[in-house]
Image (cartoon, rainbow, N blue to C red):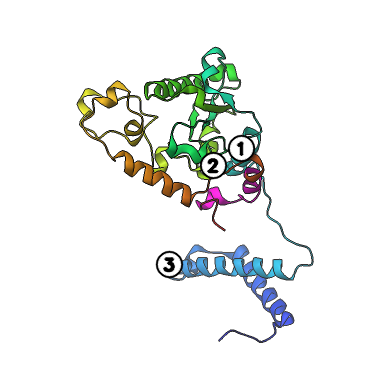
Amino acid sequence: MPNTSKPNFQKILEEIAELRRLLGAVDSNFNPTAISKKSAPRVIVESRLLMEDLRRVREKISPIRFDAIDITLGRSDSVAKFFTFNFIRQEKQPLKDLAAHPFYGSGVYAIYYHGKGESAYQLLSGTETPIYIGKADPKIVYAESAEEQGSVLHTRLKEHAKSLTEGGLKLSNFRYRASAIQSGMQAAVETFMMQLFRPIWNKENKVCFGIGKHGDKASTRGNRRSPWDTMHPGRSWADATAENQMHRHEIEAKIAEHFQKYPIIADKESLYDILTLAGGSLSTGKNLFEP
């Protein structure tokens, strides 16, 4: 049965004072041999539970509301969240114009579908949910300028554009965003954005992966063809592969199932709302769409 008695705060205060006195003695006169190997783990666990109880009670009885700090630059996921807000403010650029506009920088990029030809991707078309997210590492690990980082973002996007063309897809149906960020932060930002958007072409989501492959060696062409190459045949090294990992109808079914589980973000306003509520999701590994 639940405890319905009223809390006796005077008694709680007295016991806290006594506990603080005992802990003060431990702090000033602690001898590692004074606690047994059996008792130490129990004290550690019970101390953690006590701290959680004290924190919860403090927040409940305080006349001033406790709020978590949304952005702290000491945590990589907070920096990633801050970057993502800035990233999505950019206008999407036509992928077909990429070759004519080279640029320096390493960081994170996203590719978006804006076409009508692929029925499996139709729900994505023109939305804020990218079909693929990737990163490009700097040429110099601790590069301090975009020029020192090299034109790696541009090069990576050109590689994807080539794959799209070879796979029979029109570049005019795709847009991209790309941004140079501080060297060393690209992995954290990429992880945050992949957990936020769950793009169907990223291998981590196990849906329609394979666009990032650069080719199989002759010795490994016994591997089965990636789902992306099954959906978009044309890359010569992939066409030489013996069999598919999945049939097209299976891939399309997985895409539809994925969109049911991870709803598409239609516009920037919806995306801003989700980001505002996304604190802590990266560190816990939870789906950002879960309550």
- The amino acid marked with disc number 1 is Thr
The crowd level at tag 3 (other Cα within 10 Å; few <14, some 14-19, many 20+) is few
Q: Is residue 285 magenta?
A: yes
Q: Quadrant of the C terminus?
A: bottom right
Amino acid type at image mark 3: Lys
Earlier along the polypeptide chain: callout 2 or callout 3?
Answer: 3
Q: Nearer the viewer, residue 112 or 51?
A: 112
Between the C-alphas of marks 3 and 1, the distance is 47 Å
**Of all residues shown, which one is farthest toward the top?**
100
Q: Is residue 47 above or below residue 67?
A: below
Q: Is residue 6 left or right of residue 182?
A: right
The 10 Å Cα crowd at callout 2, few under 14, some 14 to 19, many 20 or more, is: many
Magenta-colored span:
271-286
Which image quadrant: the N terminus? bottom right
Element carrying mark 2: helix
Per the rendering, the mark at residue 84 is 1
Residue under numbered circle 2 = 192
The residue labelled by disc 3 is 37
Whether residue 216 is visible here, answered yes or no, is no
For discs 3 and 1, the disc positioned in front in the rendered view: 1
Q: Which mark's residue is nearer the viewer, 2 or 3?
A: 2
Query: Horizontal and vertical percent for residue 154?
Result: 52, 20
Label 1 secondary element = helix
**Circles 1, 2 touching at the beta carbon (< 8 Å):** yes
Mark 1 surroundings: few (<14), some (14-19) or many (≥20) residues within 10 A: some
Q: Amino acid at mark 2?
A: Phe
Please check the rendered image and state whether residue 208 is part of the magenta-colored stretch, yes or no: no
In the rendered image, residue 269, in percent from the top left (x then y), is placed at: 67, 43
